[in-house]
Image: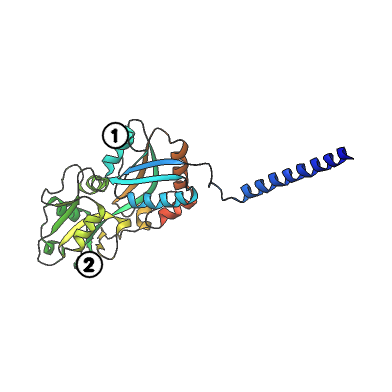
Amino acid sequence: MKAAKFRLLGVVMAALLVLGMLAGCSRAEKAPQGTSGLSGTIVIAGSTSVQPLSEELAAAFKEKHPDVDISVAGGGSSAGIKAAQEGTADIGASSRELKPGEKGTLFETLIAKDGIAVVVHPGNAVNALSLDQVRKIFAGEITNWKDVGGSDAAINVYTREEGSGTRGAFEEIVMGEDMKISNKAGVQNSTGAVRTAVAGDPNGIGYISLGSVNKAVKALKIDGVEPSKETVLNGSYRIARPFLYLTKGKPTGLVKAYIDFVLSPEGQKIVEQDFIPVK
């Protein structure tokens, strides 16, 4: 009799154990995909144009993976390239193409595209310039707004600092090899600083990421083409550049998981809010 009771108790306990395992499996199946198993820290550094996008992408990734910490810092594209090369950052961010001497062992991942808008004060009468006029203004050859259809006032030029990816792309696309940005231009150390300077100067002109244009400044048509996602994609707006994530060799582990998220439909939907998706 006692043996029968023990056998019955054993059957009941085994059944409860199986039910518990099934319930655990059910909970695991219901858990949001990708919310477990990832932990650690990722350091991203580089382009101040890419920085706000990286911050949004990092926040969305952390929502899915609470045990992952992502640090995002600026410093400019050149600094980001160097940080990736030296391993002081897991990901270097660049808003310009790498020069041949910078490539080395770096692995490039294109995460977005962006246009560079030439901006003026909203009260400026000028709405459009040719690429050649932009080049001559920034070189210091055209110095008065009246020479390009504006009022009789000196043009105040604002540019980014040396090493900036935005400046590098602007110099390559607009200035070319034969012309340099005037050393009289006011140098600003971030996209936001250029926008603020132009917004506060009725005679100012500068260049910023298309994704950073707001009502504080006016983006000019260049060669008759308005800067927009559509015109950057179809190639009619010529002042455009890539947003790159750089890693020392192919990304692996946690860094790969993050970059895969950035390139996923969810990540590219975040990109699309201000920039141009690549997937």
Mark 2, Cα crowd under 10 Å, few <14 / some 14-19 / many 20+, is some
Secondary structure at badge 1 equals: helix
Q: Position of residue 108 (x, y in %)?
A: 38, 38
* Amino acid type, callout 2: Pro
Question: Is disc 2 placed on a helix, strand or loop?
Answer: loop
* Depth check, front residue: 235 or 98: 98
Please give the residue where the numbered disc 1 appears in the rendered image: 102
In the image, taking residue 158 as reference, residue 74 lies left or right, namely right
Instruction: Check the image and report above or below for 256 versus 192.
Output: above
> Measured from the top left, where is residue 202 in percent x and y?
16, 65
Instruction: Classify 115 as above or below 216.
Output: above
Three-letter amino acid code at disc 1? Glu
For the point 35% across and 56% down, which residue is it?
231
Category of crowding for the residue at label 1, using alpha-carbon neighbours closer than 10 angstroms: few (below 14), some (14–19), many (at least 20): few
In this orientation, which residue lies closer to the viewer: 184 or 145? 184
Residue visible at 34% across and 38% down? Answer: 89
The answer to whether residue 234 is visible is no
Residue to which mark 2 is pinned: 122
